Image (tube, rainbow, N blue to C red):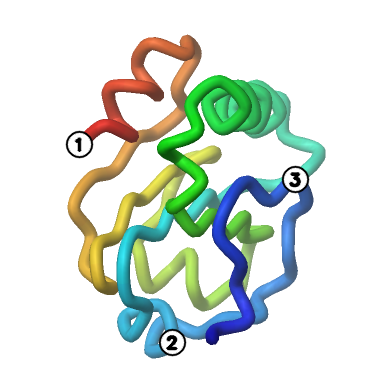
């Protein structure tokens, strides 16, 4: 079993996972790139928290909340330019991307892809 648990993760993690490790993850994974001080990220985090709380089907989704910034390799590998950026992976491959959601409906549509 990998070190990244399924379900919502409330805290940002320093880069503890590499691009190679991400590409080897099986199943569904939601990468959330941002910073705890960013107001856009704070809103995005609340939207994700609500989505996980309201819909139990997301319990099968691995959520990795990555602290991003200058010199952070994982964010650069995924070409993240704005925060928050949500990237949905299936078996390590990107299937969808959402940047700066402002409403729960857009996030729900994204997660249901």
At mark 1, the secondary structure is loop
Q: Give coordinates of residue 2: x percent, y percent.
A: 55, 84
Q: Earlier in the sequence, mark 2 or mark 3?
A: 3
Judge left or right: residue 98 versus residue 48.
left
Identify the residue position indicated by label 1 in the image: 113
What's the distance in space between the residues labelled 1 and 3, CA to CA?
A: 22 Å
Looking at the image, is mark 1 or mark 2 nearer the viewer? 1
Q: Which residue is mark 2?
A: 21
Mark 1 or mark 2: which comes first in sequence?
2
Looking at the image, do the residues carrying marks 2 and 3 touch, with CB atoms under 8 Å apart? no
Q: Earlier in the sequence, mark 1 or mark 3?
A: 3
Q: Residue at x 50, y 84 (%)?
A: 18
> What element does badge 3 sit on?
loop
Q: Is residue 55 above or below residue 64?
A: above
- CA–CA distance in space, label 1 to label 2: 23 Å
Task: Give the alpha-carbon distance from disc 2 to disc 3, as whole Å.
Answer: 21 Å
Residue sitting at x 66%, y 80%: 16
**Residue 101 in picture, x, y percent from top left:** 45, 22
Q: Which mark is residue 39?
A: none
Q: Which of the 4 image quarters holds residue 5?
A: bottom right
Tell me the quarter of the image containing the C terminus. Answer: top left
**Mark drawn on residue 10:** 3
Give me the residue at 68% from left, 51% from top: 9
x and y, in percent, of residue 67 in the image: 68, 59
């Amino acid at each position: 079993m990998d070190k990244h648990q399924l379900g919502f993760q409330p805290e940002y993690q320093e880069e503890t996972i590499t691009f190679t490790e991400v590409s080897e993850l099986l199943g569904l994974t939601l990468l959330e790139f941002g910073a705890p001080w960013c107001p856009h990220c704070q809103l995005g985090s609340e939207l994700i928290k609500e989505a996980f709380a309201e819909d139990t089907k997301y319990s099968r989704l691995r959520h990795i909340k990555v602290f991003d910034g200058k010199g952070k390799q994982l964010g650069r590998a995924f070409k993240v330019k704005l925060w928050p950026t949500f990237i949905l992976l299936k078996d390590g491959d990107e299937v969808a991307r959402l940047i700066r959601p402002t409403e729960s409906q857009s996030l729900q549509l994204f997660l249901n892809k």
